[in-house]
Amino acid sequence: MPRRTPLHEAHLAAGARMVEFAGFEMPVQYQGVLEEHAAVRERSGIFDVSHMGEVVLEGPSALESAQRLVTNDLTKCKDGQAQYSALCNEQGGVIDDIIVYRFAPERLFICVNASGREKDFDWMRERKAAGTTAHQRSDDWAQVAVQGPDAPGIVDSLCLPPVLDLAYYHFREATVAGVPGCIVARTGYTGEDGFEVFCPPGSAPRIWDAFLEKGVTPCGLGARDSLRLEVAYRLYGNDMDEAHTPLEAGLGWIVKLDKPSGFVGAEALRKQKAEGLRRKLVGFKLTGKGIARHGYPVLSKGSRVGEVTSGTMSPMLKESIGLAYLPAELAREGTAFDVEIRGKPVAAQVVKTPFVTKEAQKSAPKSS
Amino acid sequence: MADYPDSLKYTKEHEWARIAGNRATMGITSFAKDQLGDVVYLELPEVGAQIVRGEPFGVVESTKAVSELFAPVTGKVTKVNKELVDAPEGINDDPYEKGWMIEVELSSPQEVSELLSAAQYQELVAQEG
């Protein structure tokens, strides 16, 4: 039986169609994916992301432990700041992509994918240094993402203290809709401005209802996927996994090979970088007709050379977009190749990502 | 609840057919539309193509799902709704009028008797839905 989030009843009340995702019963859509997608691009939308997991590393050596586990450099992340990062295996393959919230050098709050709840926790617990305790907190937090150009003002109006002054990838503890002890972070997975709010599970419906009363549109996994793909955010399990490295996945910017602590997988990644990447995750558009989907073969001169990892009809561009692993020599912008759709080759071209560029993203400082 | 006009015939695969003389126009039912979610892509045969009852004649894709279209009847394609191919969201708005896909000339008119009535189809979706 799939698990339910604390917002299950709220989803049914809002007319959600539920699907199973990573062991959870989640809303895939309410009124319709296109409508929800547009709501987030033009106004605001709210997503239940309570399936995500949380792990806390605590103790005098917590920062030192985390530094040796994650690819990014947490010494460059201040207290009150969050950092996008990855966990890699010894071969450099991606175990998970994560966000680390640095409360203090002695306390790091880590948000992991639903599929990583147990896997990431066990992996970190086994490898942490003495003087660090790893806490499994996945069932202690619910999470909603409120995204869209109107989201910051709406979230701020429900928060005490205010949160509008928070910069991109910064967070604060706050009371949200009367619920104390929430964590409010200026992060998201849609390419829009907005916040993600961690809250106690029992209070999640109260927070959810408060946002709906403010006119925020409930949005499901369908819109979450098309929104993230338009800005080429990677989806773990689709675009990267343990068989692909963050360098191949185009996440070199979160891999700090030179940090003094080193990290699990650094050696393999250094070697891969020195030898040159053989394949790369690229953005593409179909110039022929159809929609590329996860797992469709990529062809060059008739032979299979790679695979589509994500694809959709972009609701904003009305074009067929996707991500695919291509041999490095074919990964240059403008290169033509084919995607095999139902046995037939359909023309495609490597393009620059993100597919959709938002003002919010251009102005937002990227977490280093 | 979704509606299924009495004037149409239906298939178990959730296509409808409007029979007029030796011609049939066809599309997908409101049940199929609701199951698929927002339709964003449609692939249909050309005028002159032969389609065969029970076999795929095209593809409809929503934001999340790919679904084949199964021919309710056998025949030769006489018209294709090109506007719908260019703007497949017409299916979301109105699957029975704006959402018609192709018209065929029946080559085996007796097949029509094998199609489901609105009442029979309603019963089928009540079980599935």
Image (cartoon, rainbow, N blue to C red):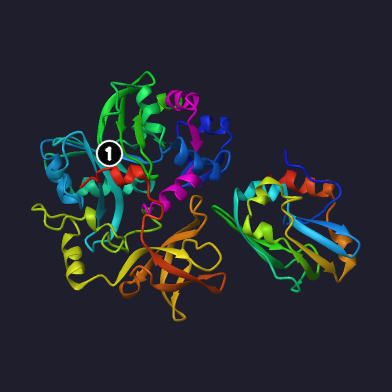
Q: Nearer the viewer, residue A8 or B94?
A: B94
Query: Splitting the image into 4 quarters, where does residue A279 fall?
Result: bottom left
Q: What is the crowding at mark 1: few (fewer than 14 residues within 10 Å), some, or many (at least 20)?
A: many
**B113 above or below A345?**
above
Q: Outermost residue toward the left?
A: A260
A70 magenta-colored: no
Instruction: Tell me if B63 is positioned left or right of A168 in this view.
Output: right
Q: Residue at x 76, y 50 (%)?
A: B97
**Mark 1, residue position:** A168
A219 magenta-colored: yes
Image: magenta residue range: A206-233
Q: Amino acid at mark 1?
A: Tyr
Q: Position of residue A111 (x, y in %)?
A: 30, 41
Q: Nearer the viewer, residue B6 or A285?
A: A285
Q: Position of residue A330 (x, y in %)?
A: 35, 73
Query: Splitting the image into 4 quarters, where does residue A251 fall?
Result: bottom left
